[in-house]
Amino acid sequence: MKNFVIGIDVGGTNVGFGVINPGGRIVARTSLVTKSFVRHKTKLINAVAVCVKDLMRENKLDRKDCLGIGIGLPGLIDPQKGVVKFLPNIPGWRNVPLKAILQKQLKVPVFLENDVNMITLGEWKFGAGQGFKNIICITLGTGVGAGLILDDALYRGEGYVAGEIGHMPLNEVGPRCSCGGQGCFERYVGNALLEQEARKVFKRKDMRLEEVSALAAKGDKRALRFWKQTGERVGNGLVGPVNLLNPTHIVVGGGVSKSHRFLFPSIRSTIKARAMSVQGKMVKIVRAKLGNDAGIVGAKVLVEQVRQGT
Ligand SMILES: [Zn+2]
């Protein structure tokens, strides 16, 4: 196969690899559990390189036909220099020139990007954001992150850290956040907080969000109210970005988005009620389409953009 791209999605517990064909489909995959390597940076990098070589050999792919490898990482990345500045959840990663290290080992162009930006690129070109020029792609999970497509391009910000929607303060005074601030959006809609609330509502210490969804599907009133209130909070947090950036679509992904049937109506009605009229009328709330594949497929968009010099 000519002109394929390899996408790599680095997470705290595993690394996903995919071969993406010119049509944007993942045609082969593999994965690596990082647990045993997590404290050994060099071992992890070498294991990633071995996985790439194996994947190419097993699928009879020639590195001359590879447009490049795109790697999404959970932290602060300098995509220009190809340096991993800092990974908050993987110890020992500070100022690692990963691009140079892997290019030397694999002899294929390597490009790095923040994982949420990579997901955003994937959803933009191959998922729920296809054909749109101004979108916000948010992931609702333990953390709440966002990628911004503005005027048909990924907006990274001067220090490559734009999109930290989870750390927009919603209140002047509020719960302390790991970022050092207080009253951050993430402290109201992050999974940890939602689960804590669910446990209070259902008076059960082991209540999980999946169960709240299952109950809502059966019409349980408390569960439906829980998701409605959660949607109101998410909507409330999105009013500011909607007014500021005037996107046509907000693509919502992450675990909680599986409860979209119960969650999205109140996100929409809250934005309609609170956003400024032009922005509020234009914006649509849509569910992410690519799930866990977005971060891998995004690599194709990244590699092609860099190669085309855009
Ligand atoms: Zn914060």
Image: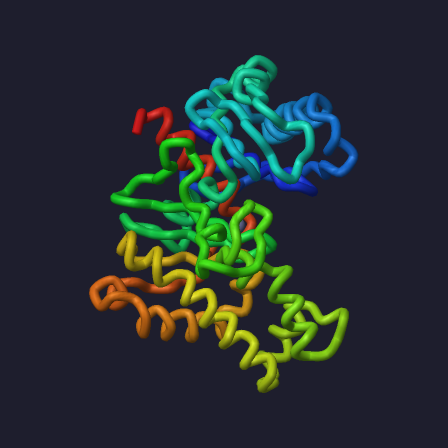
Residue at left 65%, top 72%? 198
- Residue found at the very far front of the displayed protein: 173
The answer to whether 236 is drawn above or below residue 176 in the figure is below
Q: Is residue 244 visible?
A: yes
Q: Position of residue 90 (x, y in %)?
A: 67, 35
Residue 170 position (above or below residue 41): below
**Viewer-closest of 288 and 180:** 180
Q: Residue at x 66, y 67 (%)?
A: 196
Residue 116: x percent and y percent? 49, 44
Closer-to-camera residue (293/223): 223
- Left or right, 289 with respect to 132, comes to right
Task: Please say if 99 is above or below 220.
Answer: above
Query: At x 32% / y 74%, what residue is drawn?
Result: 273
Image location of residue 178, percent across then percent down: 59, 48
Side of 125 relative to 104 (left or right): left
Q: Residue furthest top?
A: 104
Image quarter hosting the C terminus: top left
Is 122 drawn above or below residue 196 in the view shown?
above
Q: Residue furthest right?
A: 36
Q: Camera-side residue: 289 or 247? A: 247
Q: Residue at x 43, y 44 (%)?
A: 122
Residue 275 position, x and y percent, is 30, 66
